[in-house]
Amino acid sequence: MPECLFCGIAAGEIPAKIVLDAARTLAFRDINPQAPTHVLVITKAHYPNLATLAADESLLAELVSQVHEVARAEGIADSGYRVVFNTGGHAGQSVDHVHAHVIGGRPMAWTPG
Ligand code: DGP
């Protein structure tokens, strides 16, 4: 069992509700949804956060592309959705494996707390 929770989900060793499965990225439902749609998009390879993933531009582009595919698949691409990469302690990142939150299905306020 990998030490990293999201590596475990990527490996199929920890169950998750999969939304989209691509060669190098995976989208699954957040266990604690904050809106009608709340999906996490990860790279299957382990990068601790967005800052480290930024060194691999092609994989970063695939991740962002899957974010939009999730929005289309969930039917929120036209109404609008929010994409959040919590990065580091002040942002409240709790899982140290890069993940985009794709949140939508209701109007949202700004700014974040
Ligand atoms: P963050 O706080 O930005 O690191 O977001 C981590 C998210 O991961 C948080 O919204 C809850 C979600 N999460 C934590 N554990 C699990 C899990 O075991 N399964 C799933 N699907 N999501 C999880």
Image (spheres, rainbow, N blue to C red):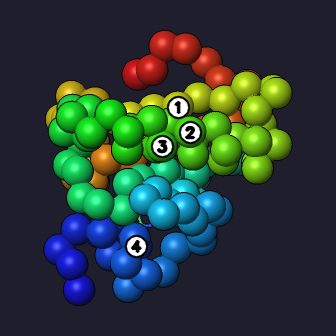
19 versus 52 height, above or below: below
On the image, numbered disc 3 is attached to which residue? 62
Residue farthest along the front direction in this orientation? 58
Q: Residue at x 66, y 47 (%)?
A: 70
Q: Do residues under tags 2 and 3 come within 8 Å of each other at their CB atoms? A: yes
How crowded pointer 2 is (Cα within 10 Å; few <14, some 14-19, many 20+) is rated as few
Instruction: Tell me: is circle 4 under 8 Å from ligand 1.
Output: yes
14 versus 10 height, above or below: below
- Pointer 2 or 4: first along the chain: 4
How crowded pointer 3 is (Cα within 10 Å; few <14, some 14-19, many 20+) is rated as some
Label 1, label 2: how far apart the Cα atoms are: 12 Å
Check disc 3 and report its element: helix, strand or loop. helix
- Pointer 4 or 3: first along the chain: 4
Check disc 1 and report its element: helix, strand or loop. strand
How crowded pointer 4 is (Cα within 10 Å; few <14, some 14-19, many 20+) is rated as some
* Quadrant the N terminus occupies: bottom left
Q: Residue at x 54, y 62 (%)?
A: 22
On the image, numbered disc 1 is attached to which residue? 83
Task: List x then y, in percent, for residue 41.
Answer: 49, 50
Label 4, label 3: how far apart the Cα atoms are: 19 Å
On the image, numbered disc 4 is attached to which residue? 9
